[in-house]
Amino acid sequence: MTPSYIGRFAPSPTGQLHLGSVYTALASFLEARACGGLWKLRFDDLDTPRNVKGADSTILHTLEALGLHWDGQVDYQRLHISEYEEILADLIAQNKVYRCVCSRKNLSQVYAQTCRDAIISPDTPHSLRLIVEKQDLSFTDKLQGHIIQNVAMHYGDYILKRKDAIIAYQFAVVVDDTRQQITDVVRGIDLLNETPKQLYLGHCLNLSTPNYCHVPVLVDKSGKKLSKTTFAGAVNIQAPSEVLFQLLIWLKQNPPLELAHTTVDDVLAWAIAHWNGEKLKGISTIVI
Ligand code: GLU
């Protein structure tokens, strides 16, 4: 029987996990565990020029040190290239995508459909774009409420496969979440605006779409999102319960002080038993 809740964490192996990504990982882990669900792990490793060798093992090591144990085998997008290609071939056959030779620097935010009706030989380097019809798309995010977006007006026809032959994140994520039977996506609010594109594609492919929950992102005092290059974002895995304790404060869970000096398992057991994601409702950033 498929469990009624399957969550996931999908880091890109582009470096070590920083506090901001561990914050998201913990929120998604707790959402899943608090309702007895599964929590899966997948590496978003298609954007090969950005991958850093060995980053996947470092990430696994950090998650283990923090007691964030995942269910089943770790998945890697690169193992599924032929699956993405097959789906693309179907979309091409159905005239739902088209070849595009526009270069990124000529593009404004909303794609002007320049290549929609152009005849472009498959031998010319090209990207593949999805034809997006004008329609309002709405969904209810567990924390950020009701969201409406017209993808055609916001982005226009968007890219499913890049000119450098790399499958675009927007496309892969939809296929991956379906393959892994993900019911609930918990991730950073920086991806909220991307969600309608993913829902749109899910509808085009006749897939059932997951529930979404976008948690705040951690920012530094100047309001900048923590990134892999910010020193403030380093995770000290020598003191894992302290790290978890601090993350729980930023997750607005009010952990009792004595928890900071217990074991990782104790902190997580408390956090699972007391988890209340609603405390993050409507919040978009946490200043650390
Ligand atoms: N790989 C993406 C990231 O590291 C996450 C994608 C997602 O959760 O949908 O930002």
Image (cartoon, grey):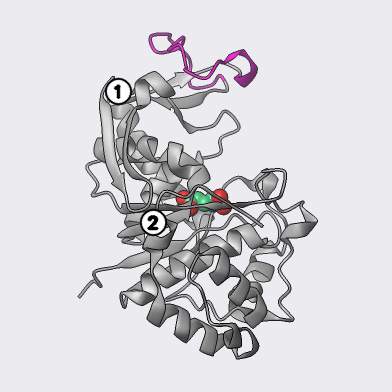
Residue 95's tag is 1
Callout 2: few (<14), some (14-19), or many (20+) C-alpha neighbours within 10 Å?
A: many
**Residue type at numbered disc 2:** Val
Does the magenta run of residues contain 201?
no
Q: Classify mark 2 as within 8 Å of ligand 1 or not, answering yes or no.
A: yes
Q: Which residue is mark 2?
A: 185
Question: Which residues make up the magenta segment?
Answer: 104-124
Does any portion of residue 45 appear in the rendered image? no
Q: Residue 5's spot in the image, x, y percent? A: 29, 68
Residue at image position (52%, 78%) is 255
For numbered disc 2, what is the local secondary structure? strand
Q: Residue 68's spot in the image, x, y percent? A: 53, 76
Image quadrant for the N terminus?
Answer: bottom left
Q: Does label 1 or label 2 sit earlier along the sequence?
A: 1
Callout 1: few (<14), some (14-19), or many (20+) C-alpha neighbours within 10 Å?
A: few
Q: Residue 227's spot in the image, x, y percent? A: 69, 51
Residue 67 horizontal side relative to residue 50, left or right: left
Q: Is residue 54 above or below residue 123?
A: below
Q: Is residue 230 above or below residue 125?
A: below
Does the magenta run of residues contain 105?
yes
Residue 78 horizontal side relative to residue 90, left or right: right
Q: Is residue 21 above or below residue 256?
A: above
Disc 1 versus disc 2: distance between alpha carbons? 30 Å
Q: How many numbered marks appear? A: 2
Q: Which image quadrant is residue 194 in? A: top left
Residue furthest right in the image: 231
**Residue type at numbered disc 1:** Asn
Residue at image position (50%, 65%) is 252
Front residue of this view, candidates 104 and 23: 23
For numbered disc 1, what is the local secondary structure? loop
Front residue of this view, candidates 108 and 144: 144
Front residue of this view, candidates 24 and 279: 279
